[in-house]
Amino acid sequence: MADTPVLEVSNLRVSYYTDAGRAIALDDANLTLNAGEKLGLVGESGSGKSTMALAMMRMIKPPGRIESGRVVVAGTDLTALDEQQMLKARLSKIAYIPQGAMNSLNPVTRIGAQMVDAIRAHEPGSSRANMEERCRQTLESVDLKRGVFGMYAHELSGGMKQRVCIAIDILLKPQLIIADEPTSALDVVTQRQVMETINRVQKSIGAAVILIGHDMGLMAQFVDKVAVMYTGRIVELSSVREMFTKPLHPYAQALISSLPKLENKGVFQGIPGLAPSLLRLPGGCAFHPRCERVMEVCRTVRPDLEVQPDGRGVACHLYGRRDR
Amino acid sequence: MSSLMELRKVTKIYSHGLVARTTTVALSDVSLTVREEEPTIMTVAGESGSGKTTLAMLLLGFIPPTMGSIFYKGQDISRIKGDDKVIFRREVQAVFQDPFAVFNPFYTVDHLLSVPIRRFHLARTRSQARDRMVEALTAVGLHPDEVLGRFPHQLSGGQRQRINVARALVLKPRLLVADEPVSMVDASLRASILETLRGLQRDHGVSILYITHDLTTAYHISKSIVVLYRGSVMEAGDTDSVITRPQHPYTRLLIDSIPWPDVNRRWGETEIKAKEGEGADHAPGCKFASRCPFAMDKCKVTPPLFRLAEHHAASCYLMEKHPTMDSAQLSDLLPT
């Protein structure tokens, strides 16, 4: 696998301008992802996970705005493209499966027509027969029958519809696939089958995957790296094993210890307090009012995400350099 | 042993269409008892289409059973009238899945909590009513001054769901039917809501019927579990046995598909042989047979319940060396 990163996000910042003030939904996000890597993006609702995905797709709508930063996918700076070029880049370079995608299939057009549409928009020269054959092959690659091409959405089960969405997403073999809670409405058995499919097609086209969600179980089973977000910032970025066995950031620690496992039956450990509103963030580290290991410096100085000697990233004064 | 709530051989069939009637068996011959003396937490688990929400609707008296009867404190709930009906309505409460959909956006939290107090004449004065609200909110771990007077949109999903529990609690119920109460709540809040529910059972003597598809939380909160598949009981028993040593092929598939948040417990080490369900299956016999890797000829006849251990039973011919038991006696083997 190539070592040149397929995705480089640097200093990405998104704000929403509301009547009550400016809310920074994504603050100074930095990420690098290699081909074939799978990253999990976790956090409570409102922590900025979906904003991050939308910003990478350049799909932030007013009153939201990308304030600064770059998103480079396979050498192309998406933030520098004009609207026409961005339309071309979507699906061919970077594909997005939004939350509840399976309910966004057009109910009155056949599945095939919706897939052909996607190819035609990017490759107007393709012949009809060629496009149709590619669609049928792609359906097969996500474990659907070729005949699904001629069916309507209502004839398919939830898991099958989600597979159709995955098929549309990989039609043009993008280098990066972003999936926002792709299985949240599915039963556990179907969920496992759909995730196995994503895993397989991702390997076969060599794409990087960003999985967004709050199901930590799914993350533990699927991704290679986990980024934990809190109030719009990445507070920890570690390999999945390190994250689940030895989380560093106190928020990540609380998140991991709140998870029900087979061993700790009957132990419930929630995280005390509530996430603050983005319009009224506390000074210093945004997590300090809920943090058990809060120090004086946390109230005034906001910690930056710093790379530790072992390569993990964490934004917390507990791990800060001592020379400051 | 008297029963608080009892389902006796309940079947619910939905039918639609006037000329060509199509029927769906949502629940088939289910008997369950929640005992009066010992408050317990019982899980009814299943995927979508298993009949678990139908079960909740039946228990709350929202829909009548097609066959069989449901009793509350010995009275058939379809015949309860007058004062007894008021008592039933007060003592059996519900918490539903979506904390965003059940609130009227025009009313404050106070309204939501004070209506049941007024309706059931639970307080004589305004201050008494307020004390009752404060007590219920405190019991679910909320600060009354942080939520009273607020509108639903000013509250988080976790707060709203706890207010739903508080609303049920002001009525001092005996039974709480909780239909997927945490499936739409963030992972970090899930633990605190489950802890709230367990506190209700432990400190307030409320029995809880926890209806869910999430076996991880079921394992942590409940003493006993009943696994449904397309309206039939597949396996039942004490939660520990069923989750750590599942016997029925369906339960085994279900438990093997749980994504445990544990990097050392890999997902699905056994391969899924069963196909994805494609539409309802009308064939008689075991409902799981069409997806079951071990299906045999005799599965075309509905298997009885086999009693595997004191607190464990499964409905599958693979267990046929064990003695059979009457499905109406199912509750006898569930620990409280």
Image (cartoon, coloured by chain):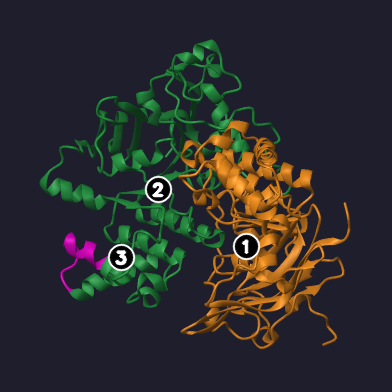
Left/right placement of residue B202 relative to residue B5 reads right
Residue nearer the viewer, A141 or A312: A141
> Front-most of A169 and A181?
A169
Q: Chain of mark 3?
A: B
Q: Amino acid at mark 3?
A: Asn
Q: Is residue B215 left or right of residue A1?
A: left
Helix, strand or loop at label 1? It is helix
Element class at badge 2? strand
Instruction: Tell me the crowding category of disc 1: few under 14, some 14 to 19, or many 20 or more residues within 10 angstroms, Cα based.
Output: many
Q: Tell me which chain the residue with mark 2 is part of.
A: B
Please tell me whether residue A77 belongs to the stretch shown in magenta: no
What is the C-alpha distance between the residues marked 3 and 2?
Answer: 20 Å
Task: Point out which mark residue B36 bears.
Answer: none
Contact between marks 1 and 2 (CB within 8 A): the answer is: no
- In the visual, does B133 lie left or right of B74? right
- Residue B8 location, x and y as percent? 29, 29
Q: Amino acid at mark 2?
A: Asp
State whether residue B244 is above or below residue B186: above
Range of the magenta residues? B113-125
Which residue lies at the image location 58% right of the left edge and 41% below the top edge?
Answer: A112
User: Residue A137 appears in which quarter of the rendering?
Assistant: top right
Q: Please state which of the two labelled residues, at mark 3 or mark 1, is closer to the viewer.
A: 3
Task: Read off the residue under disc 2.
Answer: B179
Tally the marks: 3
Q: Which residue has dot 1 on it?
A: A255
The reply to whether residue B72 is in sight is: yes
